[in-house]
Image (cartoon, grey):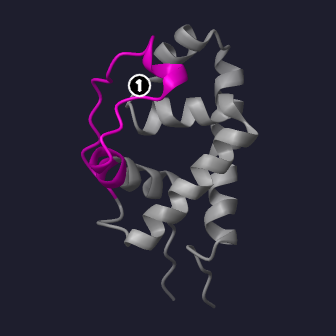
Amino acid sequence: MIYLRIDISDILWVWARRWGSFKGIKGYPNLQSFIRDGKVVQARYAISDLSDDMYLRIDSALDILRQQNLEAYQVLMAIYLQGQDKRNVCLEMALRPSTFDNLLRTAKDFMSGAMFGSGAIQVIF
């Protein structure tokens, strides 16, 4: 039996690499003023590419996350799209490391649920 485990992080890295860079996103209004471009470059991905429909579903889910929990959204965008590290985000957003971890976990859990709920990720038995 073969088990395939894909984490939401893999999907978000592909989204950031392809779709986010295609749209010309460099930062978001609440983060752009104080966070510089990240120096860390993601070199390896578990998924080679996503369909256009999947990119649109991710964008819709991110927009809902932004409306529901702005801080979690900002942390997610700083990590995945801007390539910032935990220390810089904590300093710039005045967050404790435990708060940062909670916000990132919340954002990842939301995105996982949104991807599963939209039918983008399916479980086949």
Relative to residue 80, is residue 115 drawn left or right?
A: right
Q: Quadrant of the C terminus?
A: bottom right
Residue at image position (42%, 16%) is: 35
Q: Whole-percent x and y of residue 19?
A: 35, 54
Q: Relative to 60, say whether 125 is above or below.
A: below
Nearest the viewer among 113 and 32 is 32
Residue projecting furthest to the right: 68
Relative to residue 100, is residue 29 drawn left or right?
A: left
Task: Check residue 25 for magenta coloring.
Answer: yes
Q: Amino acid at mark 1?
A: Gln
Mark 1 burial class by Cα count in 10 Å: few <14, some 14-19, many 20+: many
Task: Check residue 38 for magenta coloring.
Answer: yes
Residue at image position (51%, 89%) is: 1
Residue at image position (71%, 22%) is: 99
Q: Relative to 40, say whether 54 is above or below.
A: below
Q: Whole-percent x and y of residue 32?
A: 44, 20
Nearest the viewer among 75 and 69 is 69
Q: Relative to 83, say whether 92 is above or below.
A: above
Q: Whole-percent x and y of residue 105?
A: 67, 40
Q: Which residues are magenta?
A: 17-45
Relative to residue 39, is residue 5 drawn left or right?
A: right
**Mark 1 = which residue?**
84
Q: Whole-percent x and y of residue 113?
A: 69, 61
Quarter where residue 43 is shown: top left
Q: Main secondary structure of the magenta part?
A: loop
Q: Relative to 30, say whether 108 is above or below.
A: below
Local SS, label 1: loop
Residue at image position (67%, 28%) is: 71
